[in-house]
């Protein structure tokens, strides 16, 4: 399994070097139906580099934050 050294820029953590483990996938592109080889570190890709849909900023930040849940206090029972 090939590995790469990537430089991680400073955002909320200090800048550092990280080793990512990549894998070479051989698959058939879902759109153009061609045999393709693509190196990636995530799950098995569906599209080749040419057919891959581009991700916009709105799609990347689409996750919504969880809404706060109001918890009602239970009435205390007097132990008598």
Image (cartoon, rainbow, N blue to C red):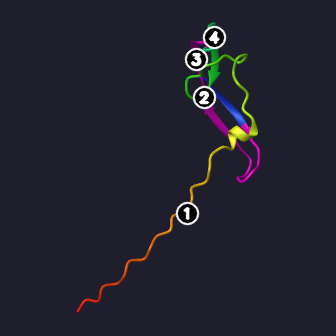
Q: Give the residue number, with chain letter if any, for mark 3.
A: 25
Q: How many residues crowd mark 3 within 10 Å: few (<14), some (14–19), many (20+)?
A: some
Q: Give the residue number, with chain letter if any, for mark 1.
A: 68
Where is residue 49 drawn, in percent x and y?
Answer: 71, 18
Residue found at the far left of this picture: 80
Which tag, 3 or 4, sits closer to the chain's start? 3
Disc 2 vs disc 4: which is toward the camera? 4
Disc 1 vs disc 4: which is toward the camera? 1
C-alpha distance separating marks 2 and 4: 16 Å
Which tag, 2 or 4, sits closer to the chain's start? 4
Q: Give the residue number, with chain letter if any, for mark 2.
A: 41
The quadrant of the picture occupied by the N terminus is top right
Where is residue 73 drawn, in percent x and y?
Answer: 42, 77
Labels 2 and 4 touching (C-beta < 8 A): no
C-alpha distance separating marks 3 and 4: 8 Å
Q: Secondary structure at mark 1?
A: loop
Q: Is residue 16 above or below residue 5?
A: below
Which tag, 1 or 4, sits closer to the chain's start? 4
Where is residue 60 drawn, in percent x and y?
Answer: 69, 39
Disc 3 vs disc 4: which is toward the camera? 4
C-alpha distance separating marks 1 and 3: 41 Å
C-alpha distance separating marks 1 and 4: 45 Å
C-alpha distance separating marks 2 and 1: 34 Å
Q: Is residue 40 above or below residue 57?
A: above
Disc 2 vs disc 1: which is toward the camera? 1
* Identity of the residue drawn at 66% across and 43% down: 62
* Identity of the residue drawn at 51% across and 64% down: 69
Which tag, 2 or 1, sits closer to the chain's start? 2
Where is residue 55 drawn, in percent x and y?
Answer: 72, 32
Q: Give the residue number, with chain letter if any, for mark 4.
A: 36
Q: Is residue 61 above or below residue 21?
A: below
């Amino acid at each position: 399994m090939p590995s790469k050294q990537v430089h991680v820029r400073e955002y909320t953590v200090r800048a550092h070097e990280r080793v990512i483990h990549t894998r070479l996938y051989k698959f058939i592109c879902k759109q153009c139906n061609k045999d393709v080889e693509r190196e990636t570190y995530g799950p098995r890709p569906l599209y080749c580099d040419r057919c891959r849909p581009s991700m916009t900023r709105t799609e990347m930040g689409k996750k919504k934050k969880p809404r706060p849940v109001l918890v009602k206090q239970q009435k205390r029972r007097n132990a008598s």
